[in-house]
Image (tube, grey):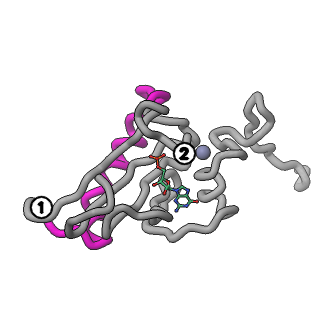
Amino acid sequence: MNTHARQAAPESPHGHAAGIDPDCIFCKIVARKIPSRAVYEDEEIYAFHDINPWAPVHFLLIPKLHIASMAQVQAEHAPLLGRLLALVPRLALEQGCQPYPEGGFRVLTNTGRDGGQEVPHLHFHVLGGPRPWLRG
Ligand code: 5GP
Ligand code: ZN
């Protein structure tokens, strides 16, 4: 067996690894090319504190897969996004949100220009903690 043989990384038509946009700020965060403060990580999902928080608790939950926004979500993404959303209650409490119903949290996904989206990599804001908040 040729021990030098290596499986090439799958390439997109743009010449980069499938599922990643090398120009995307959140793909760079996942790859640790841009630093962030981690909240949670597994093979498919990353959560990190927002750099400019609007609330006492404000973190972002993203699929590592580069999906530009909710507008590109398809049925094949359902298991991944289901798993991602199912993490919210646990992570929100761990990050300091008070228990439901007196406490709680807000989950927010901006989509496209009219939706107020600034970073084109699908992300869910999780906001919580005592009010007032700066926004939201
Ligand atoms: P959007 O407006 O796209 O829904 O939200 C983008 C969010 O990403 C904003 O709340 C912004 O503060 C956050 N953000 C942008 N760049 C960075 C960064 O480099 N690091 C972190 N941790 N958050 C960022
Ligand atoms: Zn990306």
Asked whether the residues under the numbered discs 2 and 1 touch, taking CB atoms below 8 Å apart as contact, a structural biologist would say no
Q: Is residue 99 left or right of residue 85?
A: left
Q: Judge the density around disc 2: few (<14), some (14-19), many (≥20) Cα neighbours within 10 Å.
A: some
C-alpha span from label 2 to label 1: 30 Å
- Circle 2 sits in a helix, a strand or a loop, which is it? loop
Q: Please check the rendered image and state whether residue 79 is part of the magenta-colored stretch, yes or no.
A: yes
Q: Nearer the viewer, mark 2 or mark 1?
A: 2
Q: Which residue is mark 2?
A: 119
* Image quadrant where residue 49 sits: bottom left
Q: Position of residue 28 (x, y in %)?
A: 66, 55
Disc sitting over residue 100 in the figure:
1
The residue stretch that appears in magenta: 71-100
Q: In the image, what residue type sits under mark 2?
A: Val
Q: Nearer the viewer, residue 9 or 40?
A: 40
Q: In the image, what residue type sits under mark 1?
A: Tyr
- Circle 1 sits in a helix, a strand or a loop, which is it? loop
* Image quadrant where residue 15 sits: top right
Q: Is mark 2 within 8 Å of ligand 1?
A: yes
Q: Quadrant of ligand 2?
A: top right
Q: Position of residue 2 (x, y in %)?
A: 91, 50
Q: Position of residue 10 (x, y in %)?
A: 73, 38
**Please, what is the dominant secondary structure of the magenta stretch?**
helix
Residue under the point 32% across and 64% down: 55
Residue under the point 20% across and 69% down: 130
106, above or below 111, in the image: below
Q: Nearer the viewer, residue 49 or 3?
A: 49
Q: Is residue 26 left or right of residue 9?
A: left
Residue under the point 76% across and 40% down: 16
Q: Please check the rendered image and state whether residue 77 is part of the magenta-colored stretch, yes or no.
A: yes
Q: Mark 2 or 1 closer to N-term?
A: 1
Q: Nearer the viewer, residue 9 or 86?
A: 86
